[in-house]
Amino acid sequence: MKGLVYHGEKKLRWEEVPDPEIGEDQLLVECRAVGVCGSDLHGYLGLTGRRIPPMIMGHEFSGVVRQTGKKVKRFAPGDRVCVQPIQFCGTCAFCSQGFQNICPNKKILGVMDFDGAMAELVAVNEDHAFGLAEGVSFADGSMVEPFSVTHAAVKQAPDLRGKNVAIVGAGTIGLCLLQFVVMGKPRRIIATDLSSNRLSIAGDLGAHTLVNSGQEDTVKAVLEATDGMGADIVFEAVGESPTARQSIDLAKIRGRIVWIGNSAKMVEIDMQKVVTTELNIQGSYGFTTETFKETLALMNAGKLRAERIISMKQPLSEGAAVFEKMLREKDRYIKAILVSD
Ligand SMILES: [Zn+2]
Ligand SMILES: [Zn+2]
Protein backbone atom coordinates (compact mmCIF):
# COMPACT_ATOMS: atom_id res chain seq x y z
CA MET A 1 0.00 0.00 0.00
CA LYS A 2 0.95 3.64 -0.03
CA GLY A 3 1.20 5.79 3.07
CA LEU A 4 2.12 9.32 4.07
CA VAL A 5 5.28 8.59 6.05
CA TYR A 6 6.72 11.12 8.50
CA HIS A 7 10.51 11.00 8.27
CA GLY A 8 11.36 13.81 10.69
CA GLU A 9 11.02 17.57 10.90
CA LYS A 10 9.06 18.84 7.86
CA LYS A 11 9.63 15.59 5.97
CA LEU A 12 6.45 13.88 4.85
CA ARG A 13 6.46 11.53 1.83
CA TRP A 14 3.73 9.57 0.05
CA GLU A 15 5.50 6.25 -0.52
CA GLU A 16 5.20 2.47 -0.76
CA VAL A 17 5.10 0.71 2.63
CA PRO A 18 4.12 -2.87 3.64
CA ASP A 19 0.39 -3.54 4.13
CA PRO A 20 -0.52 -3.72 7.84
CA GLU A 21 -1.10 -7.25 9.14
CA ILE A 22 -4.27 -7.85 11.11
CA GLY A 23 -4.81 -10.04 14.15
CA GLU A 24 -7.78 -12.36 14.73
CA ASP A 25 -9.83 -9.62 16.38
CA GLN A 26 -8.87 -6.83 13.98
CA LEU A 27 -10.21 -5.21 10.83
CA LEU A 28 -8.25 -3.99 7.84
CA VAL A 29 -9.81 -0.62 7.05
CA GLU A 30 -9.45 1.40 3.82
CA CYS A 31 -9.09 4.99 4.96
CA ARG A 32 -11.46 7.33 3.16
CA ALA A 33 -11.08 10.50 5.21
CA VAL A 34 -8.55 11.51 7.85
CA GLY A 35 -8.33 14.86 9.61
CA VAL A 36 -5.12 16.82 10.10
CA CYS A 37 -5.06 17.62 13.83
CA GLY A 38 -3.21 20.58 15.34
CA SER A 39 -1.08 18.00 17.16
CA ASP A 40 -0.11 16.49 13.77
CA LEU A 41 1.04 19.94 12.58
CA HIS A 42 3.10 20.44 15.74
CA GLY A 43 4.49 16.91 15.38
CA TYR A 44 5.36 17.61 11.72
CA LEU A 45 7.41 20.61 12.84
CA GLY A 46 9.24 18.36 15.30
CA LEU A 47 8.11 20.48 18.25
CA THR A 48 6.51 17.93 20.56
CA GLY A 49 8.50 14.72 20.39
CA ARG A 50 5.15 12.90 20.07
CA ARG A 51 5.69 11.72 16.47
CA ILE A 52 8.67 9.36 16.32
CA PRO A 53 9.92 8.87 12.73
CA PRO A 54 9.50 6.91 10.62
CA MET A 55 5.77 6.69 11.33
CA ILE A 56 2.33 7.35 9.81
CA MET A 57 0.10 9.95 11.50
CA GLY A 58 -3.71 10.10 11.51
CA HIS A 59 -6.04 9.56 14.47
CA GLU A 60 -9.25 11.23 13.21
CA PHE A 61 -10.66 8.96 10.53
CA SER A 62 -13.36 6.89 8.89
CA GLY A 63 -13.31 4.31 6.13
CA VAL A 64 -14.53 1.00 4.75
CA VAL A 65 -13.77 -2.49 6.05
CA ARG A 66 -11.76 -4.46 3.48
CA GLN A 67 -10.96 -7.59 5.47
CA THR A 68 -11.79 -9.06 8.87
CA GLY A 69 -9.83 -11.26 11.28
CA LYS A 70 -11.12 -14.76 12.15
CA LYS A 71 -12.79 -13.77 15.43
CA VAL A 72 -14.49 -10.60 14.18
CA LYS A 73 -18.28 -10.80 14.58
CA ARG A 74 -19.72 -7.30 14.20
CA PHE A 75 -18.33 -6.32 10.80
CA ALA A 76 -18.02 -7.60 7.24
CA PRO A 77 -16.10 -6.30 4.21
CA GLY A 78 -17.81 -3.22 2.76
CA ASP A 79 -19.07 -1.85 6.10
CA ARG A 80 -18.58 1.88 6.67
CA VAL A 81 -16.84 2.56 9.98
CA CYS A 82 -15.69 5.33 12.24
CA VAL A 83 -12.78 4.49 14.55
CA GLN A 84 -12.09 5.38 18.17
CA PRO A 85 -8.28 5.71 17.99
CA ILE A 86 -7.27 5.48 21.67
CA GLN A 87 -6.34 2.03 22.98
CA PHE A 88 -6.71 1.99 26.76
CA CYS A 89 -5.28 -0.77 28.97
CA GLY A 90 -8.63 -1.42 30.67
CA THR A 91 -7.03 -2.67 33.88
CA CYS A 92 -5.23 0.26 35.58
CA ALA A 93 -6.70 2.29 38.46
CA PHE A 94 -7.91 5.02 36.07
CA CYS A 95 -9.48 2.67 33.52
CA SER A 96 -11.29 0.82 36.29
CA GLN A 97 -12.77 4.07 37.62
CA GLY A 98 -14.04 5.02 34.16
CA PHE A 99 -11.27 7.51 33.38
CA GLN A 100 -9.88 5.63 30.39
CA ASN A 101 -8.90 8.94 28.82
CA ILE A 102 -6.09 9.42 31.34
CA CYS A 103 -4.89 5.80 31.30
CA PRO A 104 -1.09 5.99 31.62
CA ASN A 105 -0.72 2.89 29.42
CA LYS A 106 -2.79 4.14 26.49
CA LYS A 107 -1.61 4.05 22.88
CA ILE A 108 -3.10 6.28 20.21
CA LEU A 109 -3.19 5.37 16.52
CA GLY A 110 -1.04 7.86 14.62
CA VAL A 111 0.81 9.13 17.71
CA MET A 112 4.42 8.37 18.84
CA ASP A 113 5.55 5.36 16.74
CA PHE A 114 2.11 3.74 16.37
CA ASP A 115 1.05 3.92 12.70
CA GLY A 116 -2.25 5.67 12.05
CA ALA A 117 -4.64 6.35 9.21
CA MET A 118 -2.79 8.65 6.78
CA ALA A 119 -2.36 5.62 4.51
CA GLU A 120 -4.44 3.51 2.17
CA LEU A 121 -4.96 0.87 4.87
CA VAL A 122 -4.92 0.70 8.64
CA ALA A 123 -5.35 -2.18 11.12
CA VAL A 124 -8.02 -1.49 13.75
CA ASN A 125 -9.31 -3.50 16.73
CA GLU A 126 -12.90 -4.63 16.23
CA ASP A 127 -14.01 -3.09 19.52
CA HIS A 128 -12.70 0.33 18.43
CA ALA A 129 -14.79 0.41 15.24
CA PHE A 130 -18.39 1.63 15.07
CA GLY A 131 -20.82 1.88 12.18
CA LEU A 132 -21.00 5.15 10.26
CA ALA A 133 -24.54 5.82 8.96
CA GLU A 134 -25.13 5.75 5.17
CA GLY A 135 -26.10 9.41 5.06
CA VAL A 136 -22.97 10.68 6.82
CA SER A 137 -19.97 11.49 4.62
CA PHE A 138 -16.57 9.99 5.43
CA ALA A 139 -15.23 13.52 5.98
CA ASP A 140 -17.92 14.19 8.59
CA GLY A 141 -17.15 10.76 10.08
CA SER A 142 -13.51 11.79 10.53
CA MET A 143 -14.73 14.75 12.63
CA VAL A 144 -16.28 12.47 15.28
CA GLU A 145 -12.89 12.34 17.05
CA PRO A 146 -12.46 16.12 17.58
CA PHE A 147 -16.17 16.37 18.39
CA SER A 148 -15.65 13.68 21.07
CA VAL A 149 -12.75 15.61 22.62
CA THR A 150 -14.99 18.65 23.01
CA HIS A 151 -18.02 16.62 24.11
CA ALA A 152 -15.92 15.29 27.00
CA ALA A 153 -14.86 18.86 27.89
CA VAL A 154 -18.46 20.08 28.01
CA LYS A 155 -19.29 17.17 30.34
CA GLN A 156 -16.76 18.70 32.77
CA ALA A 157 -19.24 21.55 33.29
CA PRO A 158 -22.62 19.86 33.59
CA ASP A 159 -25.82 21.86 33.70
CA LEU A 160 -25.29 24.82 31.41
CA ARG A 161 -28.98 25.70 31.42
CA GLY A 162 -29.55 29.41 32.05
CA LYS A 163 -25.81 30.09 32.45
CA ASN A 164 -23.52 32.54 30.69
CA VAL A 165 -20.84 30.61 28.84
CA ALA A 166 -17.71 32.00 27.19
CA ILE A 167 -15.62 30.08 24.67
CA VAL A 168 -12.10 31.37 24.16
CA GLY A 169 -10.93 30.43 20.65
CA ALA A 170 -13.07 29.59 17.62
CA GLY A 171 -10.80 27.13 15.83
CA THR A 172 -11.75 23.47 15.24
CA ILE A 173 -11.97 22.73 18.96
CA GLY A 174 -13.88 25.90 19.86
CA LEU A 175 -16.37 25.42 17.01
CA CYS A 176 -16.96 21.73 17.80
CA LEU A 177 -17.33 22.53 21.50
CA LEU A 178 -19.79 25.33 20.78
CA GLN A 179 -22.26 22.80 19.37
CA PHE A 180 -22.39 20.82 22.64
CA VAL A 181 -22.70 24.06 24.59
CA VAL A 182 -25.72 25.02 22.46
CA MET A 183 -27.34 21.66 23.34
CA GLY A 184 -27.00 22.56 27.05
CA LYS A 185 -29.34 25.57 26.53
CA PRO A 186 -27.31 28.29 28.28
CA ARG A 187 -28.60 31.86 28.63
CA ARG A 188 -25.85 33.38 26.54
CA ILE A 189 -22.86 32.07 24.59
CA ILE A 190 -19.94 34.42 24.01
CA ALA A 191 -17.18 33.43 21.56
CA THR A 192 -13.82 35.19 21.38
CA ASP A 193 -11.14 34.93 18.69
CA LEU A 194 -8.73 37.08 16.69
CA SER A 195 -10.26 36.11 13.34
CA SER A 196 -13.55 37.62 12.18
CA ASN A 197 -13.97 34.71 9.74
CA ARG A 198 -13.91 32.18 12.58
CA LEU A 199 -16.18 34.35 14.70
CA SER A 200 -18.76 34.60 11.95
CA ILE A 201 -18.87 30.79 11.76
CA ALA A 202 -19.30 30.71 15.56
CA GLY A 203 -22.25 33.08 15.10
CA ASP A 204 -23.82 30.79 12.47
CA LEU A 205 -23.40 27.82 14.82
CA GLY A 206 -25.20 29.53 17.71
CA ALA A 207 -22.91 31.93 19.61
CA HIS A 208 -24.87 35.04 20.66
CA THR A 209 -22.02 37.49 21.28
CA LEU A 210 -18.89 37.57 19.13
CA VAL A 211 -15.83 39.36 20.46
CA ASN A 212 -12.76 40.02 18.35
CA SER A 213 -10.03 40.16 21.01
CA GLY A 214 -7.65 41.93 18.64
CA GLN A 215 -10.07 44.81 18.12
CA GLU A 216 -12.04 45.28 21.30
CA ASP A 217 -11.75 45.09 25.07
CA THR A 218 -12.76 41.48 25.63
CA VAL A 219 -13.33 41.72 29.39
CA LYS A 220 -15.56 44.77 28.94
CA ALA A 221 -17.56 43.08 26.19
CA VAL A 222 -18.10 39.96 28.33
CA LEU A 223 -19.11 42.01 31.38
CA GLU A 224 -21.63 43.90 29.23
CA ALA A 225 -23.06 40.64 27.93
CA THR A 226 -23.41 39.16 31.44
CA ASP A 227 -24.96 42.02 33.46
CA GLY A 228 -21.56 42.90 34.88
CA MET A 229 -21.04 39.45 36.42
CA GLY A 230 -18.62 37.69 34.06
CA ALA A 231 -19.14 34.20 32.61
CA ASP A 232 -20.35 31.35 34.82
CA ILE A 233 -18.34 28.91 32.72
CA VAL A 234 -15.38 29.56 30.44
CA PHE A 235 -13.91 27.04 28.01
CA GLU A 236 -10.33 27.70 26.89
CA ALA A 237 -9.84 26.11 23.45
CA VAL A 238 -6.43 27.44 22.36
CA GLY A 239 -3.77 26.59 24.95
CA GLU A 240 -1.48 29.63 24.88
CA SER A 241 -0.58 32.20 27.57
CA PRO A 242 -2.80 35.08 26.34
CA THR A 243 -5.88 32.86 26.03
CA ALA A 244 -5.29 31.05 29.33
CA ARG A 245 -5.08 34.50 30.94
CA GLN A 246 -8.23 35.56 29.14
CA SER A 247 -10.12 32.50 30.39
CA ILE A 248 -9.42 33.66 33.94
CA ASP A 249 -10.22 37.32 33.20
CA LEU A 250 -13.64 36.42 31.80
CA ALA A 251 -14.85 34.18 34.64
CA LYS A 252 -17.18 35.42 37.34
CA ILE A 253 -16.45 35.04 41.05
CA ARG A 254 -16.40 31.29 41.89
CA GLY A 255 -16.82 30.57 38.16
CA ARG A 256 -15.72 27.38 36.46
CA ILE A 257 -12.99 27.29 33.80
CA VAL A 258 -12.38 24.24 31.63
CA TRP A 259 -9.02 24.12 29.88
CA ILE A 260 -8.99 21.99 26.75
CA GLY A 261 -6.42 23.90 24.65
CA ASN A 262 -3.11 22.06 24.68
CA SER A 263 -0.34 23.94 22.95
CA ALA A 264 2.12 25.85 25.14
CA LYS A 265 3.60 23.79 27.98
CA MET A 266 4.03 26.76 30.35
CA VAL A 267 1.60 29.68 30.63
CA GLU A 268 1.49 32.82 32.75
CA ILE A 269 -1.81 33.54 34.51
CA ASP A 270 -3.24 35.83 37.18
CA MET A 271 -2.99 33.43 40.09
CA GLN A 272 -4.17 36.08 42.52
CA LYS A 273 -7.52 36.25 40.76
CA VAL A 274 -7.81 32.45 40.86
CA VAL A 275 -7.24 32.51 44.61
CA THR A 276 -9.17 35.61 45.64
CA THR A 277 -12.25 34.90 43.54
CA GLU A 278 -12.19 31.14 44.21
CA LEU A 279 -12.10 30.04 40.58
CA ASN A 280 -12.33 26.37 39.67
CA ILE A 281 -9.96 25.41 36.86
CA GLN A 282 -10.52 21.95 35.41
CA GLY A 283 -8.40 20.34 32.69
CA SER A 284 -10.02 18.08 30.10
CA TYR A 285 -8.16 15.54 27.99
CA GLY A 286 -9.35 13.09 25.34
CA PHE A 287 -12.52 11.05 25.85
CA THR A 288 -13.77 7.62 26.83
CA THR A 289 -15.19 5.05 24.43
CA GLU A 290 -18.64 5.82 25.89
CA THR A 291 -18.33 9.50 24.98
CA PHE A 292 -17.06 8.57 21.50
CA LYS A 293 -20.11 6.33 20.95
CA GLU A 294 -22.51 9.03 22.14
CA THR A 295 -20.84 11.56 19.84
CA LEU A 296 -21.00 9.21 16.85
CA ALA A 297 -24.70 8.61 17.58
CA LEU A 298 -25.27 12.39 17.40
CA MET A 299 -23.33 12.58 14.12
CA ASN A 300 -25.27 9.62 12.67
CA ALA A 301 -28.52 11.37 13.68
CA GLY A 302 -27.49 14.55 11.83
CA LYS A 303 -27.18 16.61 15.02
CA LEU A 304 -23.60 17.83 14.51
CA ARG A 305 -22.46 20.25 11.83
CA ALA A 306 -18.97 19.53 10.57
CA GLU A 307 -19.27 21.18 7.15
CA ARG A 308 -18.74 24.75 8.39
CA ILE A 309 -15.53 23.71 10.17
CA ILE A 310 -13.95 21.77 7.28
CA SER A 311 -12.16 24.33 5.12
CA MET A 312 -10.39 22.00 2.72
CA LYS A 313 -10.55 18.44 1.42
CA GLN A 314 -7.49 17.27 -0.51
CA PRO A 315 -6.25 13.88 -1.72
CA LEU A 316 -4.26 11.95 0.89
CA SER A 317 -1.45 11.51 -1.65
CA GLU A 318 -0.96 15.30 -1.56
CA GLY A 319 -0.82 15.42 2.23
CA ALA A 320 2.67 16.96 2.41
CA ALA A 321 1.48 20.06 0.51
CA VAL A 322 -1.60 20.30 2.74
CA PHE A 323 0.53 20.34 5.92
CA GLU A 324 2.60 23.20 4.44
CA LYS A 325 -0.51 25.13 3.39
CA MET A 326 -2.09 24.78 6.83
CA LEU A 327 1.03 26.17 8.50
CA ARG A 328 1.46 29.01 5.97
CA GLU A 329 -2.13 30.25 6.02
CA LYS A 330 -3.27 29.58 9.57
CA ASP A 331 -6.05 32.15 9.53
CA ARG A 332 -7.55 31.01 6.28
CA TYR A 333 -8.01 27.35 7.09
CA ILE A 334 -9.71 25.79 10.09
CA LYS A 335 -9.83 22.03 9.46
CA ALA A 336 -8.18 20.10 6.62
CA ILE A 337 -9.34 16.61 5.72
CA LEU A 338 -7.29 14.24 3.57
CA VAL A 339 -9.50 12.02 1.43
CA SER A 340 -9.14 9.01 -0.87
CA ASP A 341 -11.57 6.96 -2.91
ZN1 LIG B 1 -6.51 15.31 17.37
ZN1 LIG C 1 -5.58 1.94 31.83
Image (spheres, helix red, strand yellow):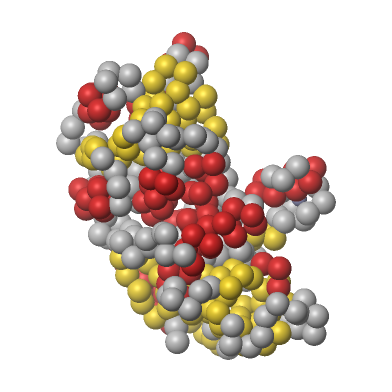
Nearer to us in this view, 171 or 205? 205
Residue 335: % across, % down: 37, 62
Q: Is residue 307 left or right of residue 209?
A: right
Residue placed furthest toward the left: 215
Rendering quarter of residue 27: bottom right
Residue 82: % across, % down: 56, 70
Q: Quadrant of the C terminus?
A: bottom left
Q: Please give the name of the residue rendered at 29% of the width and 25% of the height, measured from the top-left corner.
A: 226
Residue 191: % across, % down: 30, 40
Q: Is residue 327 left or right of residue 143?
A: left
Q: Please give the name of the residue rendered at 42% of the width and 20% of the height, measured from the top-left corner.
A: 270
The answer to whether residue 64 shows anywhere in this view is yes
Nearer to us in this view, 40 or 255? 255
Rendering quarter of residue 277: top left
Nearer to us in this view, 146 or 187? 187
Nearer to us in this view, 242 or 218? 218
Q: Against 296, is 262 above or below?
A: above
Q: Against 319, is 214 above or below?
A: above
Q: Please give the name of the residue rendered at 54% of the width and 32% of the height, measured from the top-left corner.
A: 282
Residue 158: % across, % down: 52, 36
The answer to whether residue 326 shows anywhere in this view is no
Q: Quadrant of the N terminus?
A: bottom right
